[in-house]
Image (cartoon, grey):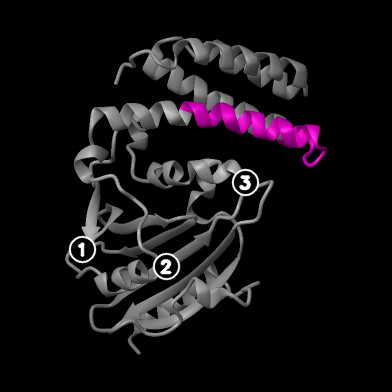
Amino acid sequence: MKKLGMMCILMWTIIFPNYGVSGNVTDHLIMQDIGQYKFMGKGGGLGSGIISATGHFSTDHTDESYGCMYFNEVSEIGVNVEVTKHAGSDSDKWLLHEVERGFRDTDNMESGPDEDSMIREVDGNRIYFYGGGVVGYRWISNKVAINIQYTNPSEHKPEPLEVVKAYLAKFPSSIVLNDTAFKARTHNEKWIKDEMDRRLWLCDKWFMQLQLKKAEEKQVYQESVKSMNVFLDYREKYYGPKAADEKNLLAGYLSTNNGSGIKIKLKEYKDWWVVNKDKAINL
């Protein structure tokens, strides 16, 4: 095998060790060669997968995430696949929203899709796609999230569409949005308002865990203030009220473990949101 292939195997072993893979891994991964793409190994365990960075709330349920790699010796492409089964309460109502976040312009606070992002149609399925030096394909199939990535620094390597199509056959996309709608102002405005909704919802979820004695005070306050800060940033950018003083106040409450102060501010933000959420935003 070529040297690059051996390096890909090594990197896979380091980043995705074969730990805790449950007996139903075959329900999620294609553990065999796909055309010219050789199956290189698998890993897996508990976790929310690619959307964990969005603050996906998983404390009241168990998500399972499985990953594997395929390598094409001819084109020297290593393809990473992650399949995550989201099995939980009302958290999954945000699943598509959270998946889309990875394709939005983070430099401009998700005001629209990233310039390299789009919705593509592959074998009749609509999926999120971004190009460039790192190429990604992502979609949901009911409550399963699929993420496929490969590096393409020269941007001249052929796409691993065999792998993408194989996983689409196994997990057909539930996405109905097309590229025109994805880039429309109405959708972008809805996504932003949904994110503000979600951030306040996350605070309520964390405080409920405290009430049920399933989370420690420190964690609940930290997670709540984190989401409140995001809400305040969005409010400043899209509605106008400055965030700095509010964020400093929350930081003071957090440093003194003042849960009552944090909850009072949360109620204040929720009351403000009820009055203002239907207003036009500065997009």
Q: Dot 1, how many residues are within 10 Å of its Cα: few (below 14), some (14-19), or many (20+)?
A: few
Type of amino acid at the residue the image marks with label 2: Val
Query: What secondary structure is marked by label 2?
Result: strand
Q: Quadrant of residue 203?
A: top right
Indicate left or right for 93 with 220 as reference.
left
Residue drawn at x 28%, y 77% is 76
For the residues bearing labels 1 and 2, Cβ distance under 8 angstroms: no
Q: Which mark is residue 25?
A: none
From the image, state whether disc 1 or disc 3 is nearer to you.
3
Q: Which residue is mark 2?
A: 81
Q: Is residue 64 above or below residue 109?
A: below
Q: In this view, which residue lies farthest toward the right?
A: 213
Magenta span: predominant SS is helix
Query: What secondary structure is marked by label 1?
Result: loop
Give the CA separation, mark 3 to mark 2: 25 Å
N-terminal of the pair, mark 3 or mark 2, is: 2
Query: What secondary structure is marked by label 3?
Result: loop
Q: Which residues are magenta?
A: 196-219
For the residues bearing labels 3 and 2, Cβ distance under 8 angstroms: no
Q: Position of residue 101 (x, y in %)?
A: 40, 42
Q: Which residue is mark 3?
A: 89
User: Which residue is more in the foreground, 228 or 27?
Assistant: 27
Q: In this view, which residue lies farthest toward the bottom?
A: 1
Q: Which residue is mark 1?
A: 154
User: Which residue is more in the foreground, 248 or 241?
Assistant: 241
Q: Position of residue 28 (x, y in %)?
A: 49, 71
Q: Is residue 221 above or below residue 121?
A: above
Indicate left or right for 279 with 214 as reference.
left
